[in-house]
């Protein structure tokens, strides 16, 4: 037995009240809840009872949850966070590698550069840094302005603060110690900043794709 | 009901296998099919199913299509070409795992 348009609207209101407006997930979660209700209707339950029983089962999936992978200050519905963690996990390890590898390498192997290349390397890294910083600002502004929520926009939101990895080397401007070796932590910040920019660029593309795919529905 | 934790690592293989047999399926249908095939022994929760489906989609193993069904929209999943290849790999891995477990749990039986 199929739900009427009015009954579907009640399910949509339930999702709205749970602040569940993630367009990449909403279609199938709505369909799943409706299918659950319909299975009770087929067992001769009234719509009201079927709705109550189904909602009891789904409530736990919409409970506000946070994750170690994003930081505990960022919370969303459990089903969104679980989804985001599963997609984000490999990028988290990329992020850690990008930070720790340079700091370990340049601490153990302090390569000394000749005087005449220092300005070139500083200039090159600063130019890269500025362009990545501008690109990050562009992504942040675009995502905030679009106001459409997807799993990817949630992931992006949790990465905005990482822009400090680009900002600190940018403010310092010089990547070398007095002995002309790299300052390991600045190179690590720079490397982590590049990794974050790549991660944000990847999820921004996914966010845009999701909007194109689901917004017209 | 068996220990659900033992099945946890096999969820992606289960989904891929179901899609190999059924061409295209939607989330609710997958949960019901698993319940039916295992006679209620294995119940896939929504909280585990959708993250697994989206990960497979993000890895390029599944393709999606949205169709209007009655008064609502439904998202169907189907295997991509690389998804079909990966299903064969995952099923081989699963068979190997089952053989190894059999040797450990029931050595006499596995020698016969």
Image (spheres, coloured by chain):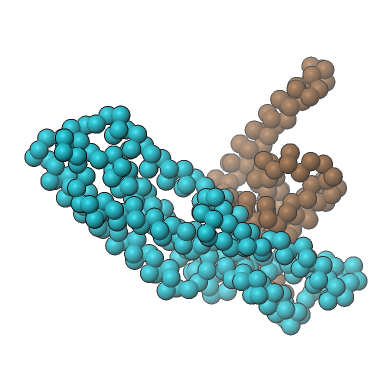
Chain A rendered in what hue?
cyan
Vertical arrangement, residue B106 with respect to residue A16, above or below:
above
A165 with respect to A52 (left or right): left
In what quadrant of the picture does the C terminus of chain A appear? bottom right
Q: Is residue A128 visible?
A: no
Give the answer, above or below, for where A3 lies relative to B15: below
Residue occupying image coordinates x 11% and y 35%: A114
Q: Residue at x 83, y 51 (%)?
A: B36
Name the foreground residue: A79 vs A74.
A74
On screen, residue B110 versus residue A65, left or right, reads right
Task: Determine the image quadrant of residue A6.
Answer: bottom right
User: Which residue of the protein is positioned furthest toward the left in this rendering?
Assistant: A116
Viewport quadrant of the N terminus of chain A: bottom right
Q: In the displayed structure, does residue A163 sit left or right of residue A74?
A: left
Q: Position of residue A196 (x, y in %)?
A: 39, 52
Q: Spot the residue most to the bottom.
A: A6
Which corner quadrant of the image does residue B74 belong to?
bottom right
Q: Which chain is brown?
A: B
Residue name at image x 75 percent, y 22 percent? B104
At x 49%, y 45%, the residue is A90
**Residue B86 drawn at (x, y percent):** 59, 41
Give the image location of residue B51, x and y in percent: 62, 54
Q: How many marks?
A: 0
Q: Kindly tell me whether residue A93 is visible in this rendering.
A: yes
From the top left corner, tell me how far across and down residue A65 is, in percent: 61, 59
């Amino acid at each position: 037995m199929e739900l009427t348009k009015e009954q579907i609207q009640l399910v949509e209101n339930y999702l709205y009240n749970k602040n569940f407006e993630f367009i990449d997930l909403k279609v199938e979660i709505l369909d799943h809840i409706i299918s659950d209700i319909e299975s009770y209707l087929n067992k001769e339950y009234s719509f009201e009872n079927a709705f109550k029983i189904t909602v009891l089962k789904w409530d736990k999936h919409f409970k506000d949850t946070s994750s170690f992978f994003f930081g505990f200050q960022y919370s969303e519905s459990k089903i969104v966070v679980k989804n985001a963690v599963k997609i984000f996990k490999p990028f988290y390890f990329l992020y850690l590698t990008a930070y720790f590898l340079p700091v370990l390498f340049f601490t153990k192997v302090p390569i000394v550069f000749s005087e005449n290349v220092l300005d070139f390397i500083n200039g090159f890294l600063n130019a890269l840094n500025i362009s990545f910083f501008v690109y990050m600002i562009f992504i942040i502004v675009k995502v905030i302005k679009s106001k459409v929520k997807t799993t990817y926009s949630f992931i992006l939101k949790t990465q905005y603060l990482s822009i400090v990895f680009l900002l600190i080397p940018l403010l310092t401007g010089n990547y070398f110690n007095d002995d002309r070796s790299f300052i390991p932590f600045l190179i690590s910040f720079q490397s982590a900043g590049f990794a974050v920019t790549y991660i944000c660029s990847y999820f921004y593309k996914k966010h845009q794709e999701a909007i194109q795919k689901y917004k017209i529905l | 009901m068996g220990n659900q934790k033992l099945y946890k690592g096999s969820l992606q293989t289960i989904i891929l296998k179901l899609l190999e047999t059924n061409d295209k399926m939607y989330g609710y249908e997958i949960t019901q099919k698993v319940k039916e095939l295992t006679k209620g022994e294995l119940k896939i929760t929504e909280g585990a199913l959708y993250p697994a489906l989206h990960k497979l989609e993000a890895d390029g193993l599944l393709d999606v299509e949205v169709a209007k069904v009655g008064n609502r929209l439904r998202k169907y999943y189907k295997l991509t070409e690389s998804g079909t290849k990966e299903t064969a790999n995952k099923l081989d891995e699963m068979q190997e795992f089952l053989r190894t477990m059999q040797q450990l749990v029931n050595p006499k039986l596995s020698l016969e």
